Amino acid sequence: MVLRIKAPKTCHADRNGSLVRYSDYVKLEKELASYRPEWQSPDLIPDIPVGTECEYWIAIYNDKTCKVIVFLANYQNRPLAYDDNGDLIDDDYLVNTDGEPHESIGWVTNKSHHEFDDFYEPIVFSDDYRLLGWAEYESPIFPHFGENK
């Protein structure tokens, strides 16, 4: 049995049919809007300092599954810089599986391995796997401890 009632003027029925007091609903909408990421064009590159990486949301369209996938990925700006003698200028660089210095500029995913530290895998985009956009990622705050550290 479904019981239908008319919402009072001080309330609003949300899309699930729940009654929400209008003043709370407006406040909630404003708060939720502040959490929505602002999506950037895939043609734009994140502006991050050289030698660093940053985590972002990325949206991908997969032609094989005909679906949009949204997941966390890192954008790395870690070029290798050499001096006039051909020596690396900085000691803080990524290495490949052979332990050799490795340059990484672009989108990567962070993977885990049971035998060694985590590693990065480049995301290869193609006509079948397209980057639709990216957005800043802000880690949610765990309410018991306040700010994330």
Image (cartoon, grey):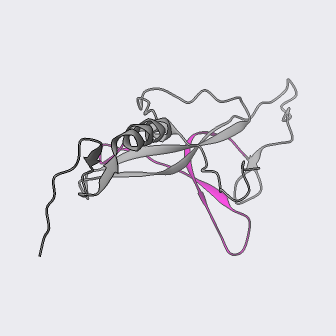
List x then y, in percent, for residue 70.
Answer: 41, 50
Looking at the rendering, which quadrant does residue 53 occupy?
top right
> Residue 144 lies in what quarter of the image?
bottom right
> Which residue appears at 44% of the width and 35% of the height?
30
Task: Give the magenta part as a residue range.
Answer: 102-131
Q: Is residue 131 left or right of residue 144?
A: left
Q: Quarter-wise, where is residue 23 in the image?
A: top left
Measuring from the top left, give residue 43's x and y in whole percent. Answer: 42, 27
Is 4 rendered above or below residue 71? below
140 left or right of 8? right
Q: Residue at x 26, y 59 (%)?
A: 65
Q: Is residue 30 left or right of residue 80?
A: left
Residue drawn at x 44%, y 38% is: 27
Q: Which of 27/117 is in front?
A: 27
Is 59 situated above or below 19? above
Q: Does 104 lie within the magenta span?
A: yes
Q: How many marks?
A: 0
Foreground pick, 36 / 28:
28
Q: Is residue 119 magenta?
A: yes
Q: Nearer the viewer, residue 6 or 98?
A: 6
Task: Give the residue displayed 78% in from the left and 43% down from the top.
Answer: 93
